[in-house]
Image: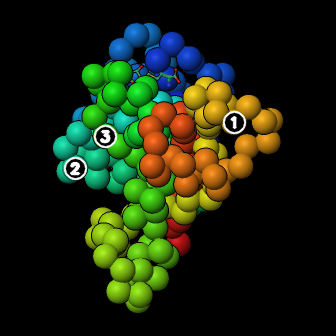
């Protein structure tokens, strides 16, 4: 039984125990993640890392959808997916010209069939993308990293996450990154 773990867009950070993949440099596997299909079997992967990578991919919505569909296809049921991205209202997002896509927790929850069904029942306007694309991801946890500017304004050690989220809805540069943990749902 295959038990592949992928570190996609590894850059120079090759991790032991993972197949390190990038379109540049000297990874274990050189592959452009915007070229399809990806070179792994259906239901073969138990863990995928995309650390500061997904914001570089899928400028065209159709390509972004294909990437999520490939992540889903190659994953086993309950595979763990970790996605780390810069916060879209932090300067770091704008400094890199290869950042082409905003990724948020709610943006990923649109690919949860369970939430899609709840929102449809409630008459919410959220696009039921999990149902439309026939893919299903459950966002288990989001870790919010406060920025240096936040700590300059709020030097106390314990971060008030609710306040941080409220302030970040109004001001820039308070959240540096989202670190999101998802599980693949297949029956
Ligand atoms: C900001 S770096 C992050 C590298 C590493 N994950 C880290 O945490 O340091 C983004 C990486 O994604 C890779 N990348 C960008 N577009 C890609 C693509 N279409 N296919 C494969 N890798 C890509 C880049 O080559 C780069 O190594």
Dot 3 surroundings within 10 Å: few (below 14), some, or many (20 or more)?
A: some
In space, the residues marked 2 and 3 are separated at their CA atoms by 9 Å
Q: In this view of the protein, can residue 82 be seen by the observer?
A: no
Q: Secondary structure at mark 3?
A: loop
Which is nearer the eye, 24 or 18? 24
Where residue 187 appears, as percent x and y from the top left, is: 53, 72
Where residue 28 appears, as percent x and y from the top left, is: 48, 19
Q: Secondary structure at mark 1?
A: loop
In the image, residue 124 sits, relative to residue 22, either above or below, namely: below
Label ID, residue 61: 2
Return the disc, 2 or 1, that comes first in the chain's sequence. 2
Where residue 92 appears, as percent x and y from the top left, is: 43, 26
Residue designated by label 1: 154
Return the disc, 1 or 3, that comes first in the chain's sequence. 3
Residue appearing at x 46%, y 42% in the figure:
171
**Mark 2 touches mark 3? (CB < 8 Å):** no
Q: In this view of the protein, can residue 170 be seen by the observer?
A: yes
Where residue 174 appears, as percent x and y from the top left, is: 54, 37
In space, the residues marked 2 and 1 are separated at their CA atoms by 38 Å
Q: Is mark 2 within 8 Å of ligand 1?
A: no
Which color scheme is applied?
rainbow
């Amino acid at each position: 039984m295959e038990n592949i773990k992928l570190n996609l867009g590894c850059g120079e950070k090759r991790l032991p125990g993972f197949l390190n993949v990038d379109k540049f440099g000297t990874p274990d596997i050189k592959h452009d993640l915007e070229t399809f299909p990806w070179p792994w079997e259906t239901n073969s992967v138990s863990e995928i890392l995309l650390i500061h990578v997904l914001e570089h991919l899928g400028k065209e919505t159709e390509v972004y959808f294909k990437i999520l569909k490939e992540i889903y296809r190659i994953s086993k049921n309950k595979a763990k997916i970790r996605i780390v991205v810069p916060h879209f209202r932090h300067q770091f997002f704008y400094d890199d010209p290869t950042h082409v896509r905003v990724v948020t927790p709610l943006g990923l929850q649109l690919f949860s069939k369970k939430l899609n069904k709840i929102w449809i029942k409630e008459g919410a306007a959220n696009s039921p993308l999990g149902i439309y694309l026939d893919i299903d991801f459950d966002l288990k946890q989001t870790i919010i990293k406060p920025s240096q500017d936040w700590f300059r304004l709020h030097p106390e050690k314990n971060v008030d996450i609710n306040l941080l989220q409220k302030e970040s809805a109004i001001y820039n540069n308070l959240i540096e990154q989202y670190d999101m943990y998802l599980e693949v749902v297949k029956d």
